[in-house]
Amino acid sequence: MQNVAIIGGGPAGYVAAITAARLGKRVFLIEEKELGGTCLNEGCMPTKALLESAEMYQHVQRAGRFGIDVPAEAARVNWKNVQAYKQGIVRRLTSGVHHLMKKNQVQVIRGKAAFIDEHRLRIERTDGEQRLEADRFLIASGAEPIALPFAPFDGEWILHSGHAMSLDAAPPVLLIVGGGVIGCEFASLYGRMGSKVIVVEMADQLLPGEDADIAAVLERGLKQSGVTVHLGSRVEALDHTTKTARVRTPAGLIEVAADAVLVAIGRRPRVAGLGLERIGVRVTSRGIEVNERMQTNLPHIFAAGDAIGGIQLAHVAFHEGEVSAVNICGGDRTVHYRAVPRCIYTSPEVASVGLTERQAREAYGEIRIGEFPFAANGRAQILQETAGKAKVMIEPRYHEIVGISLVGPRATELIGQAALLLHTEMTAEAAENVIAPHPTLSETLWEAVRGGIGQAVHG
């Protein structure tokens, strides 16, 4: 029986471990911290738990819209209990991963691994050093937050996302450097929890990877919750003594006093200290180089997840981990990135799959666009959440749906249907015959598709 050693117990690593074990390999999973990786312990799961608390708080505050009388003083944030709720979610999920490791007879080793040579690892454990020899390897070491070059993280005033979700209290004033996914989610969280939030983004829109009209809806939503947004701006200096930031805006230089500064300018692959240069695995500034089978330049060593620097999303890491494990065990699978959903759990939510309008125009020229507003949707009216729209990009020749963007209520749930449309390469005419349930938010998606070919009924 061949040995398979996996470095990293995050989404890519633990899924690969389960897959390889079920395919008959003896699997060793080496994790320095907690199983589940950043996503489960410091990223997507705890962040979404906190965002759900913010959502519930907002619902209680708006109960009067639904004819429910709740005294203003009855709605308050108990931050200690919010944190306890979050930690309970994390504990249950990490416990589930531990159970899966035992169930599939994966041997978990707690420690920090580095390559001695092409087939041996040195593992630094709290109780000493261990050597491990294996036939095949998967590097799934994840990524880490990028600090400002002039202001390293201190965990007290200058924070990364891991720090920001475990604060003792919501900061009265929070400055967020970066208006991408992480920055916007924390702005939405703390803005609704009562903090005064200031977001500074260098680009001329929030969410630079999405279309401007989609980002504009989110920007309006953030501003309605009291968030201040500075676009085309950058932080030039942070002063620990005065707890102020110097911010260059299009209108000039301003000073911002803040109780905490969250730096959310991106994440980089965590590859230092693995000994990859010692064995000749190719690494670029983006991450570990792999082919479509997740194989490095050394055929018996694979890499997946954030360590390769591609699409840094947990569900992508799940897919890459599974593909890696199948190929490690002698299979022949390739990764497919065509229909990867992108979800942003703000208020309103943003979700997309496939090409944005800008990308679709670059690829196809005169595309067709179908849009449908949530304001015209009955279910959205019932929920009192009518901001936003569904937007569908259709290529001109075959009318294939090549991109879908949603901004509005439950967008992160609706995008699953959109991903299926792209995955199956469905045309607008084929989708036109789908009978959507009524009254649901999903009707906006199908109305937008029909609108793209001039067949919308309610728009």
Image: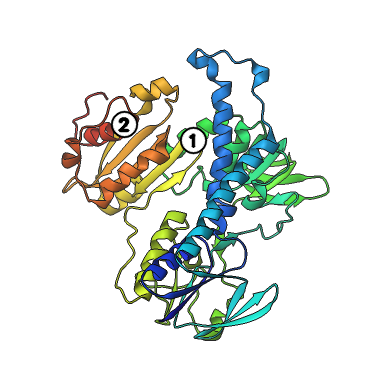
Find disc 2 in the rendering and name its residue. Answer: 444
Residue 314 can be seen in this image:
yes
Residue 32 drawn at (x, y percent): 61, 67
128 sits to left or right of 138 = right
Q: Is residue 116 above or below residue 375?
A: below
Sequence-first tag of 1 and 2: 1
Dot 2: within a 10 Å radius of its alpha carbon, few (fewer than 14), some, or many (20 or more) residues?
many
Q: Mark 1 to mark 2: distance in Å?
A: 18 Å
Q: Label 2's element?
A: helix
Residue 212 can be seen in this image:
no
Q: Amino acid at mark 2?
A: Thr
Find disc 1 in the rendering and name its residue. Answer: 218
Picture mark count: 2
Which residue is found at the position 67% from the left and 33% from the top?
Answer: 196
Which residue is found at the position 58% from the left and 76% from the top?
Answer: 274
Residue 113 drawn at (x, y percent): 59, 75
Q: Is residue 336 above or below residue 371?
A: below
Question: Contact (CB < 8 A) between labels 1 and 2?
Answer: no
Residue 10 drawn at (x, y percent): 52, 61
Which of the pair 359/440 is nearer the observer? 440
Q: Which mark is residue 375?
A: none
Q: Is residue 222 above or below residue 417?
A: above
Q: Quadrant of the N terminus?
A: bottom left
Q: Quadrant of the C terminus?
A: top left
Instruction: Single out the mark in the foreground, 1 or 2.
Output: 2
Residue 34 is drawn in which quadrant? bottom right
Q: Amino acid at mark 1?
A: Leu
Which residue is found at the position 57% from the left and 23% from the top?
Answer: 60
Which of the pair 192/36 is nearer the observer? 36
Which residue is found at the position 56% from the left and 51% from the top?
Answer: 43
